[in-house]
Amino acid sequence: MATSDVADVLGAMLVEICLACMLFGATTIQSFVYFQTDASAGSSRSLKSVVGSIWFLEALHTACSIQFAYAYTIKNFGNYDFMNRISWGAATTILIGAIISLLVHGFYIKRIYTLGNGSVIIPVVLAIPTLGNFACGIGSFALMFGHREWTAFRVDLPPMVTMTVGLGCAAAADFIIMLTTTYYIRLQRHKGNHPPGNWADTILTYSVNTGALTTVISILSVVLFVTEKHSLVYLGFIQMQTKLYSNSMLGTLNISAITPEATQGGVHPNTYKLNPRPSGVPQFGPRTARTDMPTPQVTIMQETVVSRDDLDYDDSDFKSSIGLAITADSPQENKKELM
């Protein structure tokens, strides 16, 4: 196999895994913001558990992505036969991604149900592709361990059905979420309940928080899986898709931490308030100074010693004292100069 063939099979996938790792950094930051601000103050314990579980699953998903990228590009470098084998890390990412997508889509189903004042039409429609995506993800995970090779996995009918239907269901669910969430965001902006932001905030809101970017990645994953038979580029898009799910959900939750009063007084609208923590609970934010303790004072003392030589002596005394130190071995010229 030529070097260009290796780049065609693994090159794009490696770049996409690097981008997925960067997205995990954004997931970590958003999770920290969620638990340290007012976003989690009014959340139920179950929602906090879901957020914590999603972060843990994303960390595990990232570790598995790095594992199979390392196995293909480093550990088995030059072993062209191994590129056709399905690594256990790649199969595990499919399973973890299916679980994360189920949790995130379940969150959006609940949110749309609440925003729709109890209407069950859209939530029920959204639940159908959500369950289909999860079932096909479990089936693809099992078939990966059964086939062991990418060639057989891409050709046989059962994995073709599970992957194509699963990715199609994910794209359909993301499209429904994008349309519904965009409608409610525009409705809230019209009523003045959503704080306005600059153009960058608007782009992030409508691309990430509504699931628009996730929808695009889902559609690309389906197309590339069907068309690119000799490349793993679709697998890298699936890794990115999982990261975008969690960032979309956390971005939606963190919007509630933006203070309405921040839109006034010249303060940037995306201003977060930290939750007060009870005493005895470890704090991860900046510490505040205590006022009940005396301020420590430091006294610096400096001692200066001055040495002076007040002895007066004439030139003859100096010569006589030097002359005593001259021994018999000294050169004769030195004796003459001092005498």
Image: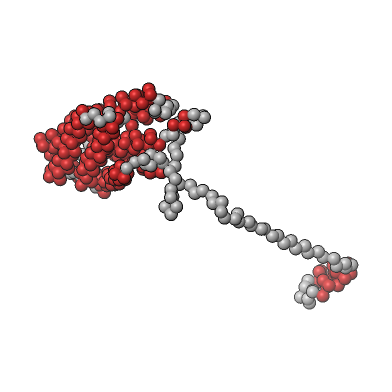
- Foreground of the two, 314 or 233: 233
Residue 238 seen anywhere in this rendered image of the structure: no
- Foreground of the two, 53 or 194: 194
User: What sort of colour scheme is used for the picture?
Assistant: secondary structure
Q: Which residue appears farthest toward the left when viewing the image? A: 157
The residue shown at (70%, 60%) is 302
Apparent side of residue 190 relative to residue 312 in the rendered image (left or right)? left
Residue 114 seen anywhere in this rendered image of the structure: yes
Percent across and percent down for residue 11 are 28, 37
Percent across and percent down for residue 109 are 25, 34
Q: Which residue appears farthest toward the top when viewing the image? A: 190
Percent across and percent down for residue 9 are 23, 37
Question: Quick one: quadrant of the N terminus?
Answer: top left
Q: Is residue 319 above or below residue 84?
A: below
Question: Quick one: quadrant of the C terminus?
Answer: bottom right
Residue 305: which quarter of the image? bottom right
- Foreground of the two, 248 or 310: 248
Q: Which residue appears farthest toward the front when viewing the image? A: 117
- Foreground of the two, 223 or 210: 210
Percent across and percent down for residue 231 are 21, 35
The residue shown at (20%, 47%) is 88
Q: Is residue 307 above or below residue 144?
A: below
